[in-house]
Amino acid sequence: MRYCPCRAIIYHTLKSQLQNTPSQPIDYQQLTGGGKLYQKNHKRFAQFKKNHYLCSSFLTLKYLIMKRFVLFFVLSSALLIACEPINPNGDQHVVSADDYYWYKGEKIYLERGNQEYIIYDDALLSEIDKEKLESSQSVLYYEEPNLKWGTTKPNTVIEDLEHVLYRMPSYKYGEANMFVTHTFNVKLKDNNDLSILQNMAEQHNAKIVKEGPLPLWYLLACNLPSSSNAMNIANRFYESGKFEASEPNFLGIYTVWDEDTP
């Protein structure tokens, strides 16, 4: 087989790169066997050496550019994540992993608005905070006579949280805000599943208020004070697989029945 000096040079270079080590200086005269072969082809080797140097420089430059580009991309992504606004009372988009509900087997995510739905002790809540309420009304289903539910004015924050027993952010509904109340509706799979509903309600700090006007449906409410909210609890009921449906009640939006206010 005829000895090819160009093949020897290429083999040396590729072997060095495949071994992931920096290319060593190439002794072209040694690789070609020296002597007459080198003298005869020295111009060709000189041109090849020049091309090899230019190619190596280009690859090195390309590597440095790509390395800096990747570093810039990582830093930019981190900066964007760090600067993502999380203020629910601002005009920014705020979506939480828990901001969803189930409807007819479909998981529906919601985007937070700039108001809140709260339940508070009307006899103890400060007058300053009462002025921040857009609407209020007495709460049903509880024995405490001074409890009221209310919705805050846009972009306001209740300071006297000591006397707020339940709070829930609003969610965007077109250009307006909609509110999840402290109640939710659960549909049994069978009439014999009432004991399952009672056990689940006790586990999740909720109470069965009454049987609904539709078969197998029950109205439940969060016990007060509550560290969770009706939408999250409704999701846990449905995701347990023990019930046909479980949906939160939205203030001002159609529910399974609407004969009562919250």
Image (cartoon, rainbow, N blue to C red):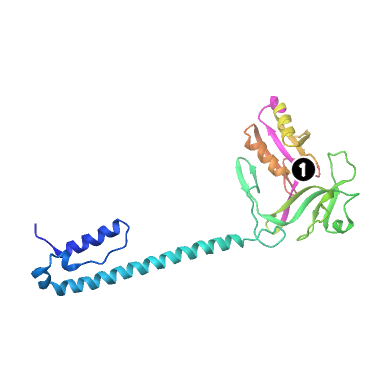
Q: Residues within 10 Å of mark 1 (few under 14, many from 20)?
A: some
Instruction: Judge left or right: residue 203 versus residue 72.
Output: right
Rendered position, 57 above or below 227: below
Quarter of the view holding residue 231: top right
Rendered position, 42 above or below 140: below
Q: Which residue is mark 1?
A: 226
Residue drawn where x is 74% and y is 30% of the image: 198
Whether residue 74 is visible here, answered yes or no, is yes
As for residue 95 lying within the magenta part, the answer is no
**Residue 14 percent coordinates (x, y):** 25, 59
Between residue 51 and residue 105, name the one nearer to us.
51
Question: Which secondary structure, mark 1?
Answer: loop
Quarter of the view holding residue 4: bottom left
Residue drawn where x is 21% and y is 60% of the image: 11
Residue furthest to the top in view is: 192
Q: Quadrant of the C terminus?
A: top right
Between residue 180 and residue 222, name the one nearer to us.
222
Whether residue 214 is visible here, answered yes or no, is no
**Residue 167 percent coordinates (x, y):** 77, 49
Residue drawn where x is 55% and y is 61% of the image: 78
Provide the residue span drawn in magenta. 177-194
Which kind of residue does numbered mark 1 sit on?
Answer: Ser
Q: Quadrant of the N terminus?
A: bottom left
Instruction: Judge left or right: residue 18 versus residue 157.
Output: left
Residue drawn where x is 90% and y is 42% of the image: 145
**Residue 252 percent coordinates (x, y):** 75, 50
Instruction: Judge left or right: residue 234 versus residue 28.
Output: right
